[in-house]
Image (cartoon, grey):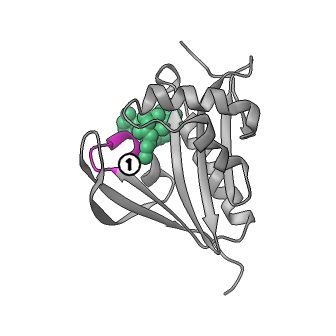
């Protein structure tokens, strides 16, 4: 299935059922519920969704932020829509919005075995800065902690 036509929109309440369905599909052991995802639509939360022509959520991602630091909480692309640039477009939108908000750094955790996600983040400028022991459950696994520094106006 090809989804070459898509648009990136700011995540809104109307997209949460679609995003929650992607959570069930991509993270069956510990999916975020619609209610949990609501944090991305509130103050200090940002989300973007990639929609197909019919408004179906093909990919989405979210970040929370405090002071000048952002933290990416979720990124997922529907299995039938992977390797078409949707994940990249969603993370780029989060980075751009982080810049607009004046954030200096964005952090994230990713399973050490998650090569596709690590490749995506590295392609967008994130670098590994450490690990968190036994950070994940089902199955238990260490997290790689990654960070990207955003350009700031100050010299
Ligand atoms: C990780 C994930 C979000 C990537 O989404 P995607 O929409 O397929 O990614 P894109 O098509 O935008 O890929 C952008 C780049 O990331 C890298 N990449 C993505 N998937 C890859 C894979 N399977 N193998 C190697 N590199 C990969 C490549 O550099 C790719 O660029 P290219 O296609 O020009 O080579 C997707 O695989 C996914 O939903 N996985 C399950 C959920 C998950 O693990 N989320 C992250 C939790 S931290």
Q: Residue at x 29, y 63 (%)?
A: 131
Is residue 105 depicted above or below 119 in this figure?
below
Number of marks present in the image shown: 1
Q: Position of residue 65 (x, y in %)?
A: 62, 64
**Residue furthest toward the bottom?**
155
| Residue with the mark numbered 1 | 118
**SS under mark 1:** helix
**Residue furthest toward the front?**
35
Q: Position of residue 14 (x, y in %)?
A: 75, 31
**Residue furthest toward the top?**
1
Q: Residue at x 50, y 32 (%)?
A: 23
Q: Residue at x 70, y 31 (%)?
A: 15
Q: Residues within 10 Å of mark 1 (few under 14, many from 20)?
A: many
Q: Where are the magenta residues, as a range?
A: 111-118
Q: Position of residue 110 (x, y in %)?
A: 38, 51
Q: Quadrant of ligand 1?
A: top left
Is residue 50 depicted above or below 148 in this figure?
above
Q: Residue 115: say if magenta.
A: yes
Find out if the beta carbon at label 1 lies less than 8 Å from the nearest ligand 1 atom: no
- Residue 89 in view (yes/no): no
Q: Is residue 45 left or right of residue 111?
A: right
* 82, 18: nearer the viewer: 18
Q: Position of residue 28 (x, y in %)?
A: 40, 29
Q: Is residue 23 left or right of residue 28?
A: right
Is residue 78 depicted above or below 124 in this figure?
above
Q: Is residue 78 left or right of residue 99?
A: left
Q: Residue at x 62, y 39 (%)?
A: 35
Q: Residue 76: say if magenta.
A: no
* 112, 36: nearer the viewer: 36
């Amino acid at each position: 299935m090809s989804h070459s036509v898509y648009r990136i929109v700011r995540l809104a309440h109307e997209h949460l059922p679609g995003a929650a369905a992607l959570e069930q599909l991509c993270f069956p052991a510990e999916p975020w519920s619609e209610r949990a995802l609501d944090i991305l639509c509130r103050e200090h939360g940002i989300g973007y969704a990639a929609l197909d022509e019919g408004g179906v959520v093909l990919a989405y991602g979210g970040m929370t932020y405090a002071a000048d630091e952002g933290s990416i909480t979720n990124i997922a692309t529907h299995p039938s829509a992977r390797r078409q640039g949707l994940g990249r477009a969603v993370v780029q939108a989060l980075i751009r919005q982080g810049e607009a908000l004046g954030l200096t750094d964005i952090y994230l955790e990713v399973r050490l075995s998650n090569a596709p996600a690590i490749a995506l983040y590295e392609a967008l400028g994130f670098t590994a800065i450490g690990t968190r022991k036994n950070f994940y459950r089902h199955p238990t696994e260490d997290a790689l902690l990654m960070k990207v520094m955003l350009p700031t106006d100050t010299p």
